[in-house]
Image (cartoon, grey):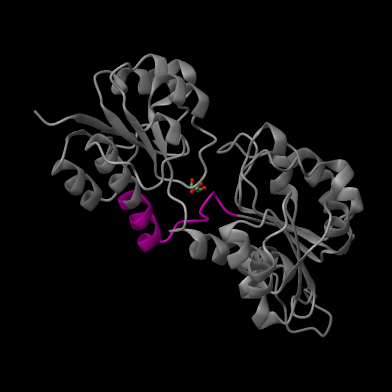
Amino acid sequence: MKPRVLVSRAVFPEVIARLAGHFEVDDNQADVILGVDGLKARLAGKAGALTAATDPLTADVIAAAPSLKALCNFAVGYNNIDLAACTRAGVMATNTPGVLDDTTADLAWALLMASARRLPAAERWLRNGEWKGWEFVQWLGTDVHHATLGILGMGRIGQTVARRAWGFDMKVLYHKRTPLPAEQEAACRASWVDKETLLRESDFLVLLLPYSPATHHIIGAAELALMKPTAHLINVARGGIVDDEALIAALRGGRLAGAGMDVFEGEPKLNPGFLGLDNVALTPHIGSSSRSTRMAMAMTAADNLIAALGGQRPPNLLNPEVFK
Ligand code: DGY
């Protein structure tokens, strides 16, 4: 008998077909949000699951599924998984690093450009029929070229964002706890600085940190106060890294020129303060959302699940101590 697996959210039919070659698949193509109770019910009797960043894979959920051997997130972030609980329960957990770097870096740049050149507000104004004619001083934005790009969190996606800055002749600064090895830093044409210098000197600050208790509100009122009033903040990482209330206050008070936000505290709920602001570009957590990248993420998660339940070490194992 084939092992039983859950696919917790709607995915491309090709992914279900691939899994069906190995497993008895309980899919959720209706895309009902399962939540804690739904996950407990649907994981019962399953050997593994393909899961999303929206699934709360808490200690409780994991304990309720004693047959579980692998949870394979189709996301690079895995703050939705209680990794310690997985390890205690002998459940392998995996993510999908690498396959979404370019697509997510592209969206960081899209938001950066949109914020710099005030695209969302200008477009709304045009659509509302308010454009009465060209004016010399109209919708003045901020130049991106030759500005200083700051990157907080310089993993694979951060480095990909940095390389895209070359075409704009930008100076690139970054901060992470441990500086990159010299040759990797040179390959990005980026310089390590301390966090305060990064905040003070960046014209555009892109956040690319994983969410954890240590990074909760890593950008709050105090950090925003260090930034230039002409600067723009871009978050394509995770909600909760930025104190959204403090950001809204800074944008409203003119203490920050603009922001580009793909992720939010408590999403999909949005702090209503964002909606009244013209100096923020907003997108609904679509950093990795191109067809080919979402396909690659789901297929990478499927590879991990097939390996894990086939007795192989999954390529993107997050808790190797569980693999026997
Ligand atoms: C990720 O891969 O972590 C993206 O945010 C999708 O959830």
Q: Is residue 29 visible?
A: yes
**Residue 14 placed where, x, y %?**
21, 52
Q: Is residue 129 visible?
A: no
The range drawn in magenta is 283-299
Residue shown at 74% from the left, 84% from the top: 134
**Residue 251 placed where, x, y %?**
82, 52
Classify 300 as above or below 257: above
**Viewer-nearest residue: 129 or 152:** 152
Quarter of the image for residue 37 reads top left
**Viewer-nearest residue: 278 or 18:** 18
**Residue 189 placed where, x, y %?**
70, 74
Classify 112 as above or below 97: below
Residue shown at 69% from the left, 63% from the top: 121
**Viewer-nearest residue: 214 or 282:** 214
Residue shown at 40% from the left, 29% from the top: 322
**Quadrant of the rendering where the C terminus is positioned:** top left
**Residue 208 placed where, x, y %?**
64, 53
Quarter of the image for residue 132 reads bottom right
**Residue 117: within the magenta?**
no
